[in-house]
RNA sequence: GCGGGUGUGGCGGAACUGGUAGACGCACUGGAUUUAGGUUCCAGCGGGCAACCGUGGGGGUUCGAGUCCCUCCACCCGCACCA
């Protein structure tokens, strides 16, 4: 008699069995012998304290890959850890009067308990927690090593300053020019900040993207755009005339604004003869210098600084500028004087913060020149245009063409003119070829408590002094005061006061902590030996890295992945890591989000999925029986209440069902729509798998070499082939579809009494259990056990399809007449083209369709199709 | 504006290098089992009475196009006054 599969009993049983047998324990490089290795990693979570469906989907995918590799005889590293520093802990500390540390550690424990029932194949002995001293001590060591190697430096930089919170805000925390929490208007402030010299690797980070052939193109493109390489020229414009009031003294950077040339970057030196003006960023040092004696320029600067930087603001912003009263000499004609303006559309953060305007060839320049009546002429003649009549008004021409109106560049193509112009600039020592990047150095200073302390001591006498190695880690004090805004470290009564390691005098600690992106930029290397006394165990890391398969959300496509790629290069060049390529992740997969329908009550408030019911073709609120408005399926979020609690699903249906469902239906890279009906479908699949196993005969009944039994075996082996390929290609949904087909066939086979069918069913069912194991591991173990499989299915050798069973002796071929399918014929697999054609011509349906027609041509594609062309 | 992606039944989606479009699942319909079902099982399920028509629209290459080429449209994502 069939029993119902009960995950509540079965799932804990098998998790305990895996634990006892230590099946997920990773072997070290030494222990592994000649086993192939596979490092499978999902992006580690922030310990919010609450597991959500996105986690389930992410970790279920990684688990399929990891379990598949284990079954294929790989030494697998599949670790888990916690990205545990960051703002939410400080917010909790403020709201709940808890300490960030205890709040975080509680959350970690809670989430560990929530992860447990999923049956994931983690080796918990590799656990890493970034807020623990054993982790951040090593991060401080890395920081100092990078400082030694000139990959870390300090400079003043502009930051978003919240005057109420007394802290720096990340760009993401500035909403419409105001602090996201305080609502205060954010100021731009100059602060001393620590930077990682990521730009040192800009070219390599860009070039090496080509080699990452197991990364999504989308992510590679996004990174390439982010790095933003452009080739062009620097041009030095000699000052012809500067206002008398402009200071003749050198400024702090050693620049004399009244006489030193203005440096400009351009990608279009070919348009130099079309120059109409120079424009400086409003916060360019020269603009500032002028502003000191020109109130109108000072006001212009202030207006620009007050203007929002959001996309919408930029869209609307009109181009405005102000003449600075300076004139510069054209590099190719010193008698030609060009006015220098400051303009709001010039960014101080890109290039040199100064441009030359060539209005006929640039849309921004033409708008600016026309607005202020600055004269200009076209210098690029589009193909086919008449030089006598060609004019440019309103709309710039940015395409290629022939250079004219341009002295020695006349007649050259755009491309040749660029080369010629750069050569001429070099000869006159007024410019040179150069490459610009959009990428900027990574500012890591945060005026925050809950982060990795920067291991630096500031001494009035000795400057910035690294904390000596034997004094690491610089521990966070555990009695931080969050009762006032600002950085608790900076106002802590004792923590920051120390003696200078160099001179022994009174000194102060750096009170900034590191951006949490630093923590996640090297954790994958730490996982290879999380207890190491070195930052990274070089031997283990050399064995395990790069990560063979990394899985996570596409929201990390740029920052996290770029920072990590930088870090592995920096670690390598500091001698801390043996990874010649510098690439941390050989394979990357970015999965989609989990979405759910949204529901709104009559009163307009959002409703939870469990607050509604669907009946009679409508949706109603359970409490009030009133109709509910169905909204689009969106990413699960608390604010829209379209969330489903994984713990509840696991309690109701079991982990296998939740895993199976999140992996079915949608391709993993796309969004996945959670639905109650879908879970029940998955529940049915799990029950069916168990029912089929239980109904499988206990003994063979002779050879299964013909008829239905043979067909079943063929299907089973095709399923092995297709599920294997599905896992390797991340087509989990297709793999599950193939298994459903096998399940349907096994169900049919229960009705058959053909001799050999018991043999075929036993073989097919065991294969099925093995194939299902990475997806639904608990029920697969239970099936394997009832089928009499040896050992555990988790460690059983992954099956290989029998090639003989992947081919048939007879084939069903479609027959087309003039490209339209008219018949199906059955032919021996061994039949040659002529024989297939003969069979096709004999077919009644074919004969009928050919009556009255003359056959022109017959195309036979062996094993595929027959197409008869007739008229 | 630049870059990337997607478009196939009522829905999610299959379809290897061009070769039977709609696998598998959901929803729905009919039937059987059951005291009952949000159970299980069986069957049907793109449109059209049919010839035929159908993979966002239009054109093309081909014996044959969801797949290749041209063009247009819609939606999504990333970046953005980047010189």
Image (cartoon, rainbow, N blue to C red):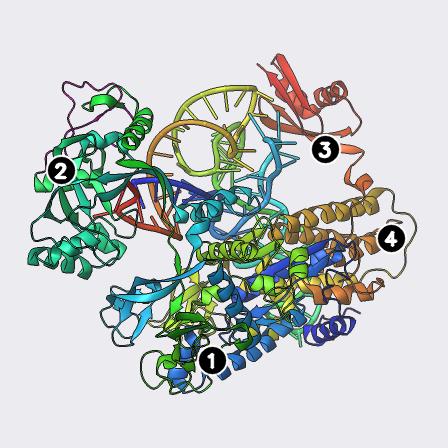
Residue highlighted by disc 3? A812
Tell me, yes or no, whether the highlighted magenta stretch contains residue A800.
Answer: no
Residue at the extreme right of the image, as rendered? A702
Q: Is residue A90 above or below residue A72?
A: below
Q: CA distance from mark 2 to mark 3?
A: 80 Å
Q: CA distance from mark 4 to mark 3?
A: 26 Å
Chain under disc 1? A
Mark nearest the camera among 4 and 3 is 4
Q: CA distance from mark 1 to mark 3?
A: 72 Å
Q: CA distance from mark 4 to mark 1?
A: 66 Å
In which quadrant will I find the C terminus of chain A? top right
Residue highlighted by disc 2? A338
Q: Residue at x 19, y 18 (%)?
A: A386
Mark 4 Cα-neighbour bin, 10 Å: few <14, some 14–19, many ≥20: many
User: Which mark is drawn over residue A552?
Assistant: none
Mark nearest the camera among 1 and 3 is 1
């Amino acid at each position: 008699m069939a029993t119902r599969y009960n995950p509540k009993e079965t799932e804990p049983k098998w998790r305990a069995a895996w634990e006892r047998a230590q099946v997920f324990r990773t072997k070290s490089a030494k222990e592994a012998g000649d086993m192939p290795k596979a490092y499978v990693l999902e992006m580690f979570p922030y310990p919010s304290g609450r597991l959500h469906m996105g986690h389930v989907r992410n970790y279920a995918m990684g688990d399929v890959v990891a379990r598949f590799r284990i079954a294929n005889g790989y030494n697998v590293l599949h670790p888990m850890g916690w990205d545990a520093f960051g703002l939410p802990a400080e917010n909790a500390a403020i709201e709940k009067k808890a300490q960030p540390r205890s709040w975080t550690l509680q959350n970690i424990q809670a989430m560990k308990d929530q992860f447990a029932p999923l049956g994931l194949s983690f080796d918990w002995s590799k656990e890493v927690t970034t807020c623990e001293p054993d982790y951040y001590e090593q991060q401080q060591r890395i920081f100092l090593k990078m400082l030694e190697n000139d990959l870390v430096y300090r400079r003043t930089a502009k930051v978003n300053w919240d005057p109420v919170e007394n802290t720096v805000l990340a760009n993401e925390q500035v909403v419409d020019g105001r602090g996201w929490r305080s609502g205060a208007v954010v100021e731009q402030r100059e602060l001393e900040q620590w930077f990682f010299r990521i730009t040192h690797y800009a070219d390599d980070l860009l070039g090496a993207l080509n080699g990452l052939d197991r990364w999504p193109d989308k992510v590679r493109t996004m990174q390439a755009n982010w790095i933003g390489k452009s080739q062009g020229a620097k041009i030095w414009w000699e000052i012809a005339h500067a206002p008398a009031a402009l200071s003749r003294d050198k400024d702090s950077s050693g620049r004399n604004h009244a006489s030193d040339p203005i440096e400009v970057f351009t990608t279009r030196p070919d348009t130099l003869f079309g120059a109409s003006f120079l424009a400086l960023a409003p916060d360019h040092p020269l603009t500032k210098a002028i502003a000191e004696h020109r109130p109108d320029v000072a006001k212009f600067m202030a207006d620009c600084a007050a203007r929002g930087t959001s996309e919408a603001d930029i869209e609307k912003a009109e181009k405005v500028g102000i003449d600075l009263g300076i004139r510069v000499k054209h590099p190719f004609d010193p008698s030609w004087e060009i006015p220098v303006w400051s303009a709001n559309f010039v960014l101080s953060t890109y290039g040199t913060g100064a441009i030359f305007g060539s209005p006929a060839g640039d849309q921004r320049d033409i708008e600016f020149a026309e607005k202020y009546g600055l004269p200009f002429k076209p210098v690029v003649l589009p193909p086919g245009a008449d030089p006598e009549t060609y004019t440019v008004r309103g709309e710039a021409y940015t395409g290629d063409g022939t250079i004219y109106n341009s002295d020695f560049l006349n007649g050259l193509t755009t491309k040749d003119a660029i080369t010629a112009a750069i050569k001429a600039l070099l000869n006159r020592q007024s410019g040179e070829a150069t490459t610009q990047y959009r990428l900027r150095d990574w500012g890591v200073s945060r005026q925050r408590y809950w982060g990795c302390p920067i291991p630096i001591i500031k001494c009035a006498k000795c400057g910035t002094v690294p904390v000596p190695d034997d004094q690491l880690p610089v521990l966070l004090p555990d009695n931080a005061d969050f009762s006032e805004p600002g950085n608790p470290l900076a106002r802590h009564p004792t923590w920051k006061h120390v003696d200078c390691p160099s001179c022994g005098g009174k000194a102060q600690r750096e009170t900034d902590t590191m951006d949490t992106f630093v923590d996640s930029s090297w954790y994958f290397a730490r996982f290879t030996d999380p207890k190491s006394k070195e930052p990274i165990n070089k031997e283990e890391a050399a064995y395990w890295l790069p990560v063979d398969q990394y899985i996570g959300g596409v929201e990390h496509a740029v920052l996290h992945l770029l920072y990590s790629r930088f870090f592995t290069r920096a670690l390598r060049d500091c001698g801390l890591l043996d990874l010649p390529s510098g690439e941390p992740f050989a394979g990357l997969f970015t999965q989609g989000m989990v979405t759910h329908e949204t529901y709104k009550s009559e009163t307009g408030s959002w409703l939870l999925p469990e607050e509604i019911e669907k009946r009679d073709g409508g949706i109603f609120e359970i409490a009030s029986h009133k109709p509910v408005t169905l909204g689009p399926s969106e990413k699960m979020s608390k604010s829209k209440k379209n969330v489903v609690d994984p713990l509840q699903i696991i309690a109701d249906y079991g982990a296998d069902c939740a895993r199976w469902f999140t992996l079915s239906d949608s391709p993993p890279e796309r969004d996945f729509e959670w639905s109650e009906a879908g879970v029940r479908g998955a529940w049915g699949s799990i029950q069916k798998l168990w029912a089929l196993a239980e109904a499988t005969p206990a003994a063979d009944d002779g050879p299964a070499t013909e008829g239905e039994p043979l067909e079943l075996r063929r299907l089973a082996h095709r399923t092995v082939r297709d599920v294997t390929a599905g896992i390797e290609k991340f087509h989990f949904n297709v793999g599950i579809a193939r298994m459903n087909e096998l399940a349907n066939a096994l169900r049919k086979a229960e009705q058959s009494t053909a001799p050999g069918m018991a043999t075929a069913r036993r073989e097919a069912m065991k294969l099925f259990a093995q194939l299902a194991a990475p997806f639904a591991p608990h029920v697969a173990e239970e099936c394997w056990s009832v089928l009499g499989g040896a050992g555990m299915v988790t460690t059983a050798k992954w099956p290989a399809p029998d090639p003989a069973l992947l081919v048939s002796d007879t084939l069903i071929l479609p027959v087309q007449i003039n490209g339209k399918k008219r018949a199906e014929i059955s032919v021996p697999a061994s039949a040659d083209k002529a024989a297939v054609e003969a069979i096709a011509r004999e077919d009644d349906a074919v004969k009928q369709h050919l009556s009255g027609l003359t056959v022109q041509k017959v195309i036979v594609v062996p094993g595929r199709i027959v197409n008869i062309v007739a008229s």
